Image: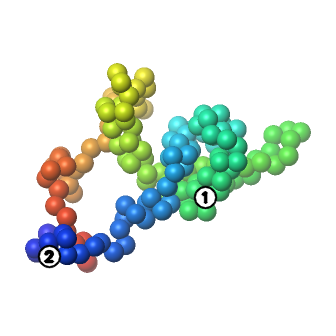
Amino acid sequence: MTGPLAPREDWIIERCPMAATLDIVSTRSAFLILREAFYGATRFEQFVQRTQISEPVAAARLRELTDAGLLDREPYRDPGQRTRSEYHLTDKGADLAPTLIALMDWGDRWGIDGGARIELRHSYCGAPVHAELRCTDGHEVQAGEIELGLKRRA
């Protein structure tokens, strides 16, 4: 921290990163499409089937996520078919993985009686994957140990 801040009631944060994220990924269907992209879905039909959202909603969310730079659209063509689009996560989209994993962890613990039937595993060693908070010095951080402060400028 660079020094004490005025009491929280006396200021509002400008350029809030949480609000900026929600401006881009603001719907349940957007999160579900991103989930499926992380699981390897690339084609429109896969997103519709796996998320169980309507085709118009899937098309709108895919367009929004592509326009926001979270997904790239690439043309493909199966023999005898018209050209269609595949969707792939960009680096910007892939950076949301910890957020999605944290949502999954929370939902497994608090949102589903008896927990989820699936878990994420590390492809190299097979150990379960979970989100956790750590400071840049590597210490595990609990929610009650976080202080709000202004970002240091280089």
Q: Position of residue 42 (x, y in %)?
A: 64, 43
Closest to the observer, 79 or 92: 92
User: Residue at (69%, 53%) from the top-left corner?
Assistant: 74
The residue most toward the left is 4
Q: CA distance from mark 1 to mark 2?
A: 38 Å
**Relative horizontal placement of residue 54, taking residue 99 as reference (left or right):** right
Q: Position of residue 98 (x, y in %)?
A: 37, 47
User: Residue at (43%, 53%) from the top-left corner?
Assistant: 95
Q: Is residue 142 above or below residue 24?
A: above
Point out which mark residue 110 bears.
none
The residue most toward the right is 80
Q: Dot 1 surroundings within 10 Å: few (below 14), some, or many (20 or more)? A: some
Closest to the observer, 64 or 7: 7
Task: Determine if residue 130 is in view.
Answer: yes
User: Residue at (44%, 58%) from the top-left corner?
Assistant: 22
The residue most toward the front is 9
Point out which mark residue 64 bears.
1
Quarter of the N terminus within the rendering: bottom left
Closest to the observer, 33 or 70: 33
Task: Determine if residue 152 is in view.
Answer: no
Residue position for label 2: 6
**Relative horizontal placement of residue 132, taking residue 52 as reference (left or right):** left
Quarter of the C terminus within the rendering: bottom left
Q: Dot 2 surroundings within 10 Å: few (below 14), some, or many (20 or more)? A: few
**Picture quadrant where residue 36 is located:** top right
What kind of residue is marked 2? Ala
**Picture quadrant where residue 15 is located:** bottom left
Q: Position of residue 140 (x, y in %)?
A: 18, 46
What kind of residue is marked 1? Glu
